[in-house]
Amino acid sequence: MNPWINADVLEVKRWTNNLFSLILNASIAPFYAGQYTKLSLYDTNTLNKNKIQRAYSYVSAPSDKKIEIYIVRIINGKLSNLLYNLQNGDTVFIKEKSFGFFIIDEIPDCETLWMFATGTAIGPYCSILKEGKNLNRFKNIVLIHAVRYQNELTYLPLMKELDKKYHGKLKIQTVISREKNKYSLTGRIPYLLKSKILETHIGLSINSKTSHVMLCGNPLMVKDTCCFLIENRNMQKHLRRKQGNITMENYW
Ligand code: NAP
């Protein structure tokens, strides 16, 4: 049993015309950082008012009092447009129990943990790093956030706070594909790996002996990066029955 329960909308933070975060209050069951939930609303455009539901990851840590979810508004998307237009005091349905295995307890020990995200898929890493549990076993953690434009680096202030909290263990790199910025690398993740620009910039290498790679977001980024690491860095997908070095979560 995993019922829908009510979540009160405390705030809608509209970062851009397409990116927003919902701040919610709901009596959900305890979850693991990196997991996702489902949100649902009635489709007001249909006569029989069907419920529309979609999966979304938490940005908030399990120990946070408020739930935070980071969402991209999809052109002609049914639910994301309804969610974007929610007001404080509205109600949305949320699943009581959370889903997924993109959690730190599933990652084997290694020297350097690489966390790659595109777009709103920065959420699970924010949750994991805010919670901070079971991370002592990694010497380095590298967080890479790739977006189209600079103003989509919504959680950069939080990432900078986390940077301070981890006292040098955490390295943060932003990547922007459609404009230039002196603090970010330019291009897409697979190109930055093939060219070795990313690793040279960070000063660490990705290899099957010392590294584990988490990939989250755009399914094509996840696929292309995974293929590159398998073909060029002798890495394997990590499975519960067979240890590897790549853990993935597609966002759609
Ligand atoms: P995005 O299009 O995935 O862009 C984020 C970053 O990923 C950009 O830097 C982009 O580079 C890069 N990227 C795109 N394809 C790539 C590939 N094959 N390999 C490596 N990097 C790649 O994400 P977004 O801007 O956050 O989201 C916009 C769109 O994503 C939405 O409008 C929707 O179509 C889709 N989306 C759908 C869902 C869903 O259906 N639930 C959820 C989230 C997002 P470029 O600038 O070069 O493209």
Image: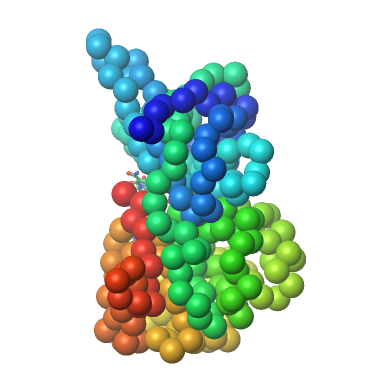
The correct choice, above or below, for 103 with respect to 10 in the image is below
Q: How many labels does the image show?
A: 0
Q: Which residue is drawn at 68% across and 55% down?
A: 157
Q: Residue sitting at 74 percent across and 66 percent down?
A: 164
Residue 73 seen in this snapshot: no
| In front of the other: 177 or 109 | 109
Whole-percent x and y of residue 186? 48, 70
In the rendered image, the vertical position of residue 55 relative to residue 117, given as above or below: above
Q: Where is residue 135 in the image (x, y as percent from the top left)?
A: 60, 69
User: In the image, is residue 56 above or below residue 77?
Assistant: below
Q: In which quarter of the image is ligand 1?
A: bottom left
Residue nearest the viewer, comparing 132 with 240: 240
Q: x and y percent of residue 218 in the render?
A: 35, 57
Asked whether 55 or 158 is in front, the reply is 55
Residue 76 quadrant: top left
Question: Is residue 198 rendered to the left or right of residue 4?
Answer: right
Question: Between 132 and 225, which is closer to the camera in this rendering?
Answer: 132
Query: Looking at the image, which residue is at 60% across and 22% down?
Result: 88
Residue 97 picture location, percent across and down = 44, 38
- The part of the image, by quadrant, that contains residue 39 is top left
Name the quadrant of the N terminus: top left
